[in-house]
Image (spheres, helix red, strand yellow):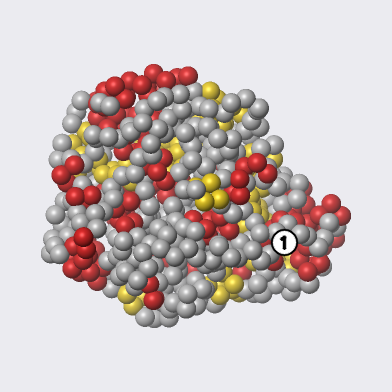
Amino acid sequence: MKRTALFAIIASTMLGVQLVGCGGSGHDASGAIQVPTAQALSITDVEQIIAQAVAEAQARGIGGTIAVVDRVGNVLAIFKMSTAAATFTINGARNATGGLEGISVLPSELAAIAKALTAAYFSSAGNAFSSRTAGQIIQEHFNPGQANAPAGPLFGVQFSQLTCSDVSQQATAGTIGPKRSPLGFAAQPGGLPLYKNGNVVGAIGVISDGKYSVVTDYLTDDAPDQNELIAVAGSAGFAAPEAIRADHIEVGGLTLRFDNSEALLSNPAAAPAFSSINGVAGALVNVTGYGGSPIAAGAAYGTPASGIRADTNPDLAGIGDYVVVDAANNNRFPPIAGTDGLLTAAEVTQILKSSLQVANQTRSQVRQPAGLTAQVSVVVVDTNGAILGFIRSPDTLVDSVDVVTQKARTAAFFSNPVAAATLMARAPATYFDTTQSSISGYVTAAQSFFGNANQFADGIAFSTRSIGNIASPFFPDGIEGTPNGPLAKPYASWSIFTNGLELDLINNQLLLSLTADNRSSGCTGIPQLKNGITLFGGGFPIYRNSQLVGAIGVSGDGTDQSDLIGFLGIANAGTALGTGIGNAPPAMRADTLTPQGVRLRYVNCPVAPFNNSDVQEPCAGL
């Protein structure tokens, strides 16, 4: 279908999209957009959650550290039982060394926060994901343990929401979110989302075994997890609705996992009052830069106090978008012209608008009930990595605020002819164990891999999906026994905590934030990549004819849906504008490359993706 016709279909039908509250109803969900209502955890709620979790830990004869956060990452409380381990050990379960592997000096509170934030940031009114779910979708195989299966749909997402991010907020900046995580996303069971009236209001995170690790085999692992069971007890009365839990959701034909057991040894309804355990079973602790003591109430998501609210920009009227705001309720990222002079504010506005119009017609991959509209965040950056505009759907995942910017910056950077020289000039990553990993080595490895001495200097357009193809420990993706992609570590020395260029770019600043309490903004030392890179679909460079002018990032309800919305959003904006804006010319795209005889991927658009439309292949011919 021609671009003009498709744009007309989406522009006209999106006005008929049905808005529904998060409580849902029994009617056909096709085309409905979930809009959250203002709900928040009270201090009394947080006290109840902690008391229930402590009672279960005591029933099991173990100690633990328990964190409670709200939906935008504010730490509401941290309770450390008197028998809890003071620290934990990072272990990717593959006997790898280097990177973050083996670090054992960090306080347990950081792991508990990361687990809680993971569950909160990956959940919505239509899907409830746990930190176990996160571990399932970020590893080198999906499912983990399935030989020769491709990487997870969110491969590499563990290195986002970092303490050095310029997008996620400092943890100490009042209630305005979304907040940074001390360790990025957790992949270990122990983090569960918390709900009120069908709305995500936060999450609980538990560490009780001194380990910060990952389940590497989802095919045979069905053992109960003590961290998870303590979190299950804590979530009683605030548990995720059964129908939207991960184990009711399929991705790529595989059922996701939420938890392994809810066989408690305690009765949460009979848990003692918080006042009777505080100072007896343990005590509240305060973590510098995050909080935790005294207990705080959560911010109601969707209100200015949370940092995310409905947009009031008349130029974006009618698409139902939300924005992120500062403490004065000002939009942090309104549409502006590029700092490089290559995109106008009007063009940025149209790209954002066209993309969310596509989203408003697209069927979600993960929301329940089936047929609900996809919800995403959309960002546009320029060639300098500056954020030119950001909007989001009402109830999309909070993780996407940071991730979309990583996606856009990744696509813009690797499509820019300066990428090779910029990477070659970077200092090596110096790991906690003092070993080093050369950043320039990834460039020379890519040049050899592609048989091109000008790799990342010749202007080939890379999407984030293309970069993910060559950042896997196997090439082709998932096929065991094959060499690693040039941006990844060899599989013998690979783990989710030492995976290659993605970690190495941020390693030095991340260690400073963990060991020296240095939360400076900027993770890589590369201005165009301030919050790091990402390795899965949804990021595309933007061109004016054949000139790179910026990039788009989209993230939310499904990786292929993110590809569709970003790719088609650019194309539709180009049609509406008539200024030459569009996707990379086909001859310039990374899917023209066949390293080692295998063609790279540039975009994956799902077939028949729209509600109330019979369009089958919306990306064909673009």
Residue 318 lies, with reference to residue 356, above or below; the image says above
Amino acid type for the residue under numbered disc 1:
Ile
Residue 110 percent coordinates (x, y): 57, 65
* Of 215 and 438, the residue lying toward us: 215
Residue located 42% across and 20% down the image? 13
**Quadrant that contains the C terminus:** top left
**Mark 1 falls on what kind of element?**
helix
Disc 1 marks which residue? 230
Residue 146 percent coordinates (x, y): 48, 63
Residue 78 lies, with reference to residue 243, above or below; the image says below
Residue located 41% across and 24% down the image? 613
Query: How dense is the environment of label 1, judged by Cα within 10 Å: few (below 14), some, or many (20 and up)?
Result: many
Residue 22 percent coordinates (x, y): 62, 33
Q: Is residue 223 left or right of residue 487?
A: right
Residue 481 percent coordinates (x, y): 35, 71
Residue 534 position by quadrant: bottom left
Q: Is residue 484 left or right of residue 232?
A: left
Q: Is residue 93 left or right of residue 541?
A: right
Residue located 83% across and 56% down the image? 267
* Of 203 and 451, the residue lying toward us: 451
Q: Is residue 492 visible?
A: yes
Count up the numbered dots. Answer: 1
For this orientation, the residue located farthest to the bottom is 434
Residue located 66% across and 59% down the image? 260
* Of 512 and 260, the residue lying toward us: 260
Q: Is residue 528 visible?
A: no
**Quadrant that contains the N terminus:** top left
